[in-house]
Image: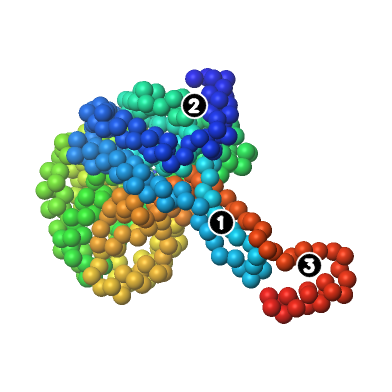
Amino acid sequence: MDQTEIATQFARMKAGNDDRRTGFGLVQRRAALGDLASMVRRNERAIVAALAADLGRPEAEAILMDYLNILQEIRHARRHLRRWMRPRRVWPTLATFGASARVDPQPRGTCLIIAPWNLPFHLALGPLASCLAAGNAAILKPSELTPTCSALIARMIAETFPPELVTVIEGDKAVAEALLALPFDHIFFTGSPAVGKIVMAAAAKTLASVTLELGGKSPVIVGPDADLKQAADWITFGKFLNAGQNCISPDHLYVHASVKDAFLATLRARITHAYGSGADSPHLTRIVSPSHATRLSALIADAMEKGATTIQSNGQSGQSVGPHLMEGLQPEMRMAQEEIFGPVLPVIPFDAIDTVIEAINARDKPLALYIFDRDPARVEEITRRTTSGAVGINLTLLHYTHLNLPFGGVNTSGIGAAHGEAGFRAFSHERAVMRNRFLLLPLLFPPYGPRVMRLVGLIKRILG
Ligand code: NAD
């Protein structure tokens, strides 16, 4: 689609905002969500094949991460939609005695969803489920880096939804920029913090509201009282699922010096058990593109040149990058500065938890923080003294699938939240409605004679 076609399509959708406000109620929204679920189920094999083609993703990961997460999101929305949509009555305050009031969740209107490549289906269709649940129309732009998935999303959506309700516009940065120039009612962006800033700057031109689901460097801490086997199991899962290409993958690991050797031995054995000792395990997703794989090898080379050492390396063969454990991270290394977003885990030993907390608080606020420790006081202390989008205790990644938890970051790791009711709210405008029942305020209307002034004095004593 060129710029003119995009603008025409957008205008057609936006013209439908008025009708959707009244005509896209509970029944229609549940039906649209049902259509979305059937579409995904019908195309299960095609989804698995597209993920294999673009990312070499093992079927287990394709089903668990993309396919089932979408169906869970839809099922949860359908089940709870009536309650989410219900206007919420609120109590009057002293100053508004005599009025009734409520909050109505309204559709925002026509929304733009821009998705990344790392979970190409879930991060496009998950937000779409929330968007439809909230009664909106959407233009969806999948990532150009997973072209088979993008083409499949475009085909499935075109077969399932009328274009004035959901339209997929495929393309790269230039297409995204053309879309961002339009006055959307809401923009839901998932991607890197760098592009998040570009999206927010574009939204500032039209004052579109934004939800930004970004990333960053999520730390994991293995404390002195950690269950080392449990920590090794979950960190192997969290770091190497999708070859570390998840927004909430542990980025770097702090381990208490007293357990370091025992923990690393357990972790290495766990990694070898899961992925063998080479780069091309069939259980490991590929790196998305040759340039992303080159970036990772450059990160490793840069760290080695500046004094880092390898604890374990399963090597690299083109886009297949095996698990790497590194030691000796220094602040000047790229690996210490950039989001790693790959199967490379730097390990940093520590003696005092204060130094870890200070290091975390000195950086951008992470999307996730993971703590492995059986001492509840230590876990509580770390949790209270830091901030992050989420905290996982004795687990990794799984908070992502908990639909009763908001999923989002803070500042550089994101603005707003997604999933479940939080996703519904992201795509809704909370409209305040207040009705006069027997408000006494007219007694205070001008002219401000002695009677009004006596009343003002009385009210001041009550409310002041
Ligand atoms: P990206 O920011 O490069 O791209 C995301 C989307 O933005 C793509 O559709 C792309 O076409 C588009 N885009 C690229 N340049 C643009 C520009 N100048 N203007 C407008 N749009 C543009 O991110 P990515 O590489 O696809 O994904 C990896 C990043 O996403 C990581 O930082 C990761 O942490 C983050 N992420 C966050 C979440 C989350 O839920 N918080 C989930 C997955 C990934």
Q: Is mark 3 within 8 Å of ligand 1?
A: no
Q: Are marks 2 and 3 in contact (CB under 8 Å)?
A: no
Residue 425 visible from this viewpoint: yes
Rendering quarter of residue 42:
top left
Applied colour scheme: rainbow
Between the C-alphas of marks 3 and 1, the distance is 25 Å
The kind of residue on which mark 2 rests is Glu
Instruction: Give the mark nearer the N terminus: 2 vs 3.
Output: 2
Residue 333 picture location, percent across and down:
38, 50
Amino acid type indicated by mark 3? Leu
Q: Nearer the viewer, residue 271 or 189?
A: 189
- Reading the image, the residue beneath label 1 is 102
Q: CA distance from mark 2 to mark 1?
A: 31 Å
Extreme-bottom residue of the structure: 461
Q: Camera-side residue: 245 or 11? A: 11
Q: For the residue labelled by badge 1, is the local secondary structure a helix, a strand or a loop?
A: strand
Viewed as shown, does residue 94 lie left or right of 395?
A: right
Q: From the viewer's perspective, is 454 left or right of 340? A: right
Which label lies toward us, 3 or 1? 3
Above or below 249: residue 180: above
Viewer-nearest of discs 2 and 1: 1
- Residue nearer the viewer, 305 or 311: 311
Q: Position of residue 401 (x, y in %)?
A: 30, 50
SS label for mark 2: loop
Residue receiving disc 2: 164
Residue where numbered disc 3 is placed: 443
Query: Judging from the image, what secondary structure is the residue with disc 3 in?
Result: helix
Q: Is residue 9 above or below residue 332?
A: above
Residue 321 lies in what quarter of the image? top left
